[in-house]
Image (cartoon, grey):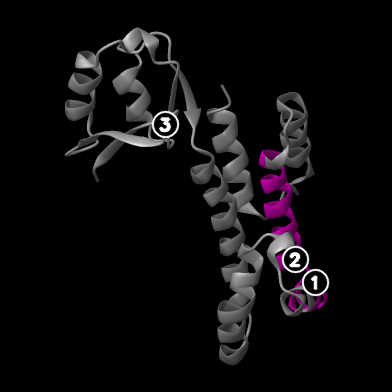
């Protein structure tokens, strides 16, 4: 893995480091000019990043990149799809993987009329998979909310709506968000 440092304000590459280990990150942040002016650091959930910049960027607040969090929701849905596929015939498994998988990874507003019909059939024939799709979408909608307090409430409501059994990937997602909530 390489480490790409970008300026979020200008969307420009600022630096590329050969590795993303603390041995490379700490000296970079230690030698960064005007380190006290850095206000935000946006990264994935890899803990060594925070440990690498924390002591060198005293005014920076950590933000977890939305892409990485939303990807977990899509992966949780995909795990549910795979669980449901196990009980299907080979032909049905291939159909679900090739057709339904792509539909469930899309947002409702981007579905074509044909895909909307296929989603309706999914709801009829695979209600638990449709429920997983709805959990994914409800989680994505949290990030669509323009108001922070409303989004926080929506996250807690989403977490409370998860059934106590099943949907392991979504429970893992909820725990991950809670662990990085600050």
State the image coordinates of residue 156 (x, y, percent, origin top left). Answer: 74, 33
Question: Is there CB contact under 8 Å for labels 1 and 3?
Answer: no
Identify the element where label 2 is drawn. helix
Name which quarter of the figure residue 58 lies in: top left
Residue nearest the viewer, comparing 142 with 161: 142
Q: Position of 37 compared to 85: left or right?
A: left
* Label 3 sits on residue: 10
State the image coordinates of residue 47 (x, y, percent, origin top left). Answer: 38, 30
How crowded pointer 2 is (Cα within 10 Å; few <14, some 14-19, many 20+) is rated as many
Identify the element where label 3 is drawn. loop
- Sequence-first tag of 2 and 1: 1
- Sequence-first tag of 1 and 3: 3
Q: Which mark is residue 123?
A: 1
* Label 2 sits on residue: 130
In terms of secondary structure, what is the magenta stretch mainly?
helix
The residue drawn where x is 42% and y is 37% is 44
Q: Which residues are magenta?
A: 118-143
Establish if 2 lies above or below 42.
below
Identify the element where label 1 is drawn. helix
The residue drawn where x is 59% and y is 91% is 91
Question: Is there CB contact under 8 Å for labels 2 and 1?
Answer: yes
The residue drawn where x is 49% and y is 32% is 64
Q: Is residue 122 magenta?
A: yes
Q: CA distance from mark 3 to mark 2?
A: 40 Å
The residue drawn where x is 69% and y is 64% is 110
- The residue mark sitting in front, 1 or 3, is 3
């Amino acid at each position: 893995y390489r480490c790409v440092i970008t300026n979020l304000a200008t969307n420009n590459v600022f630096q590329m480091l050969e590795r993303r280990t603390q041995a490379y990150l700490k000296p970079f942040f230690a030698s960064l000019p005007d380190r006290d002016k850095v206000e935000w650091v946006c990264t994935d959930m890899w803990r060594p990043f925070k440990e690498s910049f924390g002591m060198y960027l005293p005014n920076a607040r950590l933000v977890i990149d939305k892409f990485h969090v939303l990807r977990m929701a899509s992966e949780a849905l995909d795990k549910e799809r795979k669980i449901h596929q196990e009980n299907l015939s080979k032909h049905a498994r291939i159909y679900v993987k090739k057709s339904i998988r792509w539909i469930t990874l899309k947002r409702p507003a981007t579905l074509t009329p044909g895909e909307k019909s296929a989603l309706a059939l999914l709801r009829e024939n695979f209600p638990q998979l449709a429920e997983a799709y709805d959990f994914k979408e409800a989680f994505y909608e949290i990030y669509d909310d323009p108001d922070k307090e409303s989004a926080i409430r929506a996250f807690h409501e989403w977490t409370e709506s998860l059934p106590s059994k099943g949907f392991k990937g979504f429970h893992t997602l909820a725990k991950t968000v809670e662990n990085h909530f600050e």
